[in-house]
Amino acid sequence: MARRGENARFWLPVAALLLLAGYSSQKVVRAHVDPSVDSIDYSFRRELPGRRGSIFDASGTPLVKSVPVWDYHLDPVALTNRVVRRRGEPPRPRAAIVKTIATALGLDFRKVLAMSEDVKRRYQPLAVSSDPEAHRTLADSTLVAGVSIEDRQIRQYLHRRRLSHVLGSVNAEHVGSAGVELRFNRYLTGVPGEIRGMKDARGRELYDKRIVSVDPVPGADIYLTIDHTLQYEAETALAAGMATFEPGSGWCLVMDAKSAAILAMASLPDFDPLRFGSTPDAAKLNRVTNFTYEPGSVMKVITAAAAFDSGFAGPDRIYSTERHDERYYKLPGDGSHVWDPTMTVGDAIVHSSNIVIGKLGYDLGPQRLWSYMRAFGFGTKTGIELPGEEVGILPDWKRWDKATWSRAPIGQGVAVTAIQLASAYQAIANDGVRMKPHIIKKIVDANGMDLYSHSDEVIGRPISSNTARMLRKVMLGVATKNGTARRAAIPGYSVAGKTGTAQKVIGRHYAPGLYRATFCGIVPASDPKLVVLVTLDFDANRKFHQGGNSAAPVFRRLATAALRYLMVPPDRPDEIPEDDDEDEFDQIMEERARSIVEAGV
């Protein structure tokens, strides 16, 4: 009996220890396979991402596309615990596995070896690659272990920063975060596919056990109205103007005069779409559509349009140039300009007289002038297919005080966007018919079917065709030796345009010495093909801040390039360029150009 009791006391603890060891072992094994389940599950489900649609320019040149890639991570624990061998061969040592991984991905062997030995850090990023040979190697469990592979996409902006404000960007989840990428995210986003089936003990799919296989559907492709060559010319001209005249920012656009299609749109500073998250807010801003500002004298053309179209006054109506006229309340001044005692309305546009146009606007009355401004699209969105478009500021005429009666006609007390301003000039170019500005040509699904195709849309007729032609004839004088923008003249082509030099408002007051310089032109004026707008925003006092001295030369460079590229024939082929005498501006620009060349040498 004593021996039987001693045996029991010996074997009971042994049995308990064996049970505990068995329980612990199965828990460890189960936790290693999958800590969230109570039994080994050989089923699996994998989502296949749908390729995001591409973006093209009007001619079909690709601007943005998504490329399928594999994202590789290293798990040192799995590499250590799993035996890697080919049939009939001994297990592969760690160094051999690491060498295979490093060679396939083009990585440094010693770096990957150090990663493989750091078992405290699991799922360390290795590389992103689109190489199918590397994928075949790293997916082979007889060659490597510990490498996890994830299917994903990377977005490629094929021209880097070009057109960044229009194209926008995507975030880490491949969701649009600005520009066309944001506005048309639901079209661009593909539909994911799915695979469901069974896998073996090593995690390899058993293809004969596949239950579900649904292919992903790529997103739709978007075609813009933008011409990438004209976009290059726009950004190059604007960058040159920024370097020459040193504004803090600048923007420009080229619009088709008949259809209001946007052929080029640029805003500086710009950004790298791949680093959108770290870009300063000032650089993210598309100043063509998402920024409002007092336009200054470019608005005088709209005042003249209201006067001509309503029959109130014609280009030959004469006004006194005397500012201190008791019939008018607080007229704006003309700075240091000295005029003849009288001036016609037509000459007031050419010489940009605040006094004369202020009087004209005052006589028109706020209700009539406001109605025409509204008809031209100010105070409302144009509806262009880009996110964040601003509405501008055009207070109801009943809220205008008497000072506003003569200030709004010259572009003070109202705020516009560049796209609104270009749209208004497009109506003048198109014989009074205002078209809806647009930047999307068509949207095509993965099967080549059109989901959307743009049709030109008339959104108003603010003035008659006769008024539009009369305005263009008056505006011809601006880009001449007698006008405010002789540097906007293009030999061989007629230019109908207007300058604007608007003092900036900081807080509730005008900032001394700070201006926004604008030139908006229609070319050729006799048979309009293009509307080109350029604005330079000066955040410091600069000598040549006027629209005619800074924005006009940028306009000339851009419009000349656009006319030549589009092969628009000259409407003044016999015109001989005038030999202008050098003035202070020409001398300084020549010296600056010479210093740049010498510095480059």
Image (spheres, grey):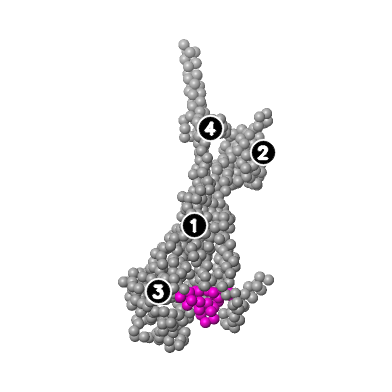
Q: Earlier in the sequence, mark 4 or mark 2?
A: 2
Tell me if mark 1 has few (under 14), some (14-19) or many (20+) residues whose alpha carbon lies within 10 angstroms of its own: many
Image point (46%, 55%), residue name: 183
Separation (CA) of disc 1 from disc 3: 33 Å
- Residue type at mark 2 is Ala
- Residue type at mark 4 is Arg
Q: Earlier in the sequence, mark 3 or mark 2?
A: 2
In the picture of the structure, the residue carrying the numbered disc 3 is 309
For the stretch drawn in magenta, what is the main secondary structure? loop
Q: Earlier in the sequence, mark 1 or mark 3?
A: 3
Tell me if mark 2 has few (under 14), some (14-19) or many (20+) residues whose alpha carbon lies within 10 angstroms of its own: few
Most distant residue in the top direction:
1
Q: Position of residue 425 (x, y in %)?
A: 46, 69
Q: Quadrant of residue 80?
A: top right
Between disc 4 and disc 1, the foreground one is 1
Q: Is residue 96 visible?
A: yes
Give the magenta part as a residue range. 470-497
Separation (CA) of disc 3 from disc 2: 85 Å
The reply to whether the C-beta atoms of the residues labelled 3 and 2 are less than 8 Å apart is no
Separation (CA) of disc 4 from disc 2: 33 Å
Most distant residue in the bottom direction:
341
In the picture of the structure, the residue carrying the numbered disc 1 is 440
Name the element at disc 4: loop
- Residue type at mark 3 is Asp
In the picture of the structure, the residue carrying the numbered disc 4 is 210
Q: Is residue 481 magenta?
A: yes
Tell me if mark 3 has few (under 14), some (14-19) or many (20+) residues whose alpha carbon lies within 10 angstroms of its own: many
- Foreground residue, 226 or 415? 226
Separation (CA) of disc 2 from disc 1: 54 Å
Q: Is residue 483 magenta?
A: yes
Q: Position of residue 397 (x, y in %)?
A: 33, 71
In the picture of the structure, the residue carrying the numbered disc 2 is 96
